[in-house]
Amino acid sequence: MLSFVKKRPLGKTGLMVSELILGTWGLSGEAYGKVEPEDAEKTILRALDIGLSTIDTCDAYGAGRIEAMLGRILSKRSGVTVITRGGVDRKTEPPSQNFTPEYIEAAVTRSQKRLRRERIDVYLLHNPSADCLKRGEATDAARALVEKGRIAHWGVAAGHPDAAQAALEKGAEVIELAYNLLHSHDLHRIAGDVMVAGAGVLARSTLGYGLLAGQWAKDRDFPEGDHRRDRWTKAELAHRVGQVEAVRFLVKGDVRSMRAAAVRFALANHLVSAVVLGPRSVQQLEELVREVGSGPTYLVDSDLEALPRALSRVGIPM
């Protein structure tokens, strides 16, 4: 199928991934409110038709339902790269992290069955601490599964740059971490380590959970079931909405919206293999792709050079 979405190498894995990746947390209905299964399926199918040939998911999304949906859909498709992750045991209350070799192997087995794949393209350990990674038990388990042919490549979805750095030191082939206009310092801090390791970088939270769409009022309320309701206090949200104004100068010319500027910013970084986007409907997906467009000029050099000064004025380091 003809695709106009460009592909990039995922570090030194040998995989070529679409620079726009379909993230599926929002489609589970657990993050931003209910999504009907048929709407989630339509969004996945439309993403594939547009050319988002890489999908990011997790064994915990919908208690495995999203993986199972993907397994059914992708059993009729070829050429799609699937990235999933594990390490959070949802059977406990509250959910707990579990990175023992036994748990990881069992989690991979469950993901293989749901995804209907003998080998998972990329498997990420889900937010382990730096100390956990340094102990080596989890990373050894991931490498062992690569040697057994059950996963092709392994990496870490990191919540902190120390964890990302520890993962790279243990040989992680892929790092996924938050990277956006208002939160770029984590990747900048480990940039040298990424280059030395030759790891692929997946940028998540590119739109800052919707903040960088640039459409929120400072007093916005979020409904029950939306994780953003508990993420920020009213004062914090008002402050963050105000910070977005510092980068609105990027919206001009063929950069048609704030969210386009946010995604283009991430794609302009040569270390980033792809950005993970989380549309919850076909309409959101099409709007995002239409507005973002494609390079090679994502943002002009003069604007990228102006960003550190603009962000510094509102207290954001780069």
Image (cartoon, rainbow, N blue to C red):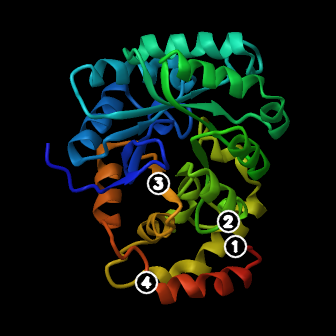
Kindly report the distance in space between the C-alpha atoms of the residues bearing marks 4 and 1.
Answer: 18 Å
Which residue position is annotated with label 3? Answer: 273
Nearer to us of marks 3 and 1 is 3
Question: Is the Cβ of the residue at disc 1 closer than 8 Å to that at disc 2?
Answer: yes
User: Can you identify the residue that label 1 sits on?
Assistant: 318
Name the residue at 65% across, 65% down. 184
- Up-down relation of residue 91 to residue 5 (above or below): above
Element marked by disc 2 = helix
Query: Quadrant of residue 192 in the image?
Result: bottom right
Q: Give the mark nearer the N terminus: 3 vs 1.
A: 3
Q: Mark 2 or mark 4, which is nearer the start of the sequence?
A: 2
Q: Amino acid at mark 3?
A: Ser
Q: Earlier in the sequence, mark 1 or mark 2?
A: 2
Provide the secondary structure element on which disc 1 rests: loop
**Placement of the N terminus among the 4 image quadrants:** top left
Q: In 3D space, how far apart are the residues under numbered discs 1 and 2 (Cα atoms)? A: 7 Å
Depicted 315 relative to depicted 93: above or below:
below
Q: Is residue 98 visible?
A: yes
How far from the left and from the top, in percent, is residue 151? 49, 23
The residue pinned by badge 2 equals 188
Name the residue type under label 1. Answer: Met
